[in-house]
Amino acid sequence: MERMREEGPCLIGFDLGWTLIDNPGRVAAYLAYLRARDLPLPSREQVERAFHLVDKRFMREFPGVLGRHPSTWLPWYLGMVNEELGLHIDMTQQLRDLAGLRIDWELYPWTLPTLEELRRRGYPLVLVSNWGPDGRALVERLGLAHYFRRIYISAEWGIEKPDPRLFRRVLLDAGVAGAGFLYVGDNYYDDVVGARSVGAKAVLLNRFDRLGVEEVNDCLVIHDLRQLLDLLPAPQGSASDAPAPEAGQREAG
């Protein structure tokens, strides 16, 4: 994969869910439900791909919905997963069986090696995520907080990507122009569109190559975060890798 031809970014930002962290428990719970009910059992990869395709459809057609309480979208979402797998299931029973489904977020295998290498190269990093009030605690619990100079959780600011105000806040705090900011995320419509709205560059992470994002043809797509390391120019300087202290929460302008 060809390196970025321009000068390296002054600041690199990351999304959180499906970019740095995964929720493998949902696939395991879905498969366990099928086994318990003696229903046709697809492979784990087939179920992962079905969830991926439904995630991408929601991102494309129903923006913001997955950020709401699951009670408002889970029946709809599971029905789409079932349809992707060609399964005709009693939804009332399925929802009852999966009602207590717990979301346990875990780091992708690529997360720490990539962040460590970027920090070693001297790139300042920030996290910008559409997440609820528990977002910052989750980042700290997973051991990610110390990699980032600043952490921006949408619930703390009252605005969400792709609103350019959130990205402008990031640039203002960092003292960086849009052209010097590179943002990486898994949602074209929130992450790529939002970053570009302030003049930043963006890379789309899509685990299954082009699956589910076939309509996207105007940005760089990678399937493993470690590919980012091959895209960036060789480091020219030795910027400090120590995260700067975070400012207190303020209202975004």
Image (cartoon, helix red, strand yellow):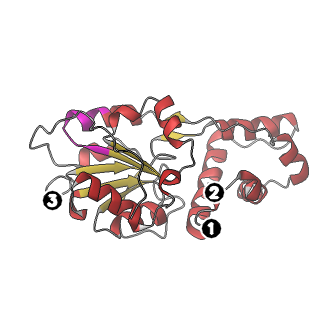
Which residue is denoted by mark 1 in the rendering? 62
Identity, as a three-letter code, of the amino acid under mark 3: Glu
The residues bearing labels 1 and 3 have C-alpha atoms spaced at a distance of 35 Å
Q: Identify whether 202 is placed above or below 96.
A: below
Please report contact status of discs 1 and 2: CB closer than 8 Å, yes or no: yes
Which residue is denoted by mark 2 in the rendering? 66
- The reply to whether residue 90 is in sight is no
Crowding at mark 3 (Cα within 10 Å: few <14, some 14-19, many 20+): few
Residue 105 is tagged as none
Residue found at x 21% / y 62%: 177
Residue 23 lies, in percent from the top left, at 59, 39
Viewer-nearest of labels 1 and 3?
A: 1
Would residue 118 be counted in the magenta stretch? yes
| Tag 1 secondary structure | loop
Left or right: 114 as drawn, with respect to 70: left
Identity, as a three-letter code, of the amino acid under mark 1: Phe
Residue 80 occupies which quadrant of the picture? bottom right
The residues bearing labels 3 and 2 have C-alpha atoms spaced at a distance of 36 Å
Residue 6 is tagged as 3
Q: Which residues are magenta?
A: 116-125
Residue 170 occupies which quadrant of the picture? bottom left
Residue found at x 65% / y 47%: 46
Identity, as a three-letter code, of the amino acid under mark 2: Leu
Residue 232 lies, in percent from the top left, at 22, 49
In the image, 6 versus 167, the foreground residue is: 167
Left or right: 5 as drawn, with respect to 105: left
Sequence-wise, the earlier of marks 3 and 2 is 3
| Tag 3 secondary structure | loop
Residue 228 lies, in percent from the top left, at 30, 47
- The reply to whether residue 34 is in sight is yes
Sequence-wise, the earlier of marks 1 and 3 is 3
Residue lying farthest to the left in this orientation: 236
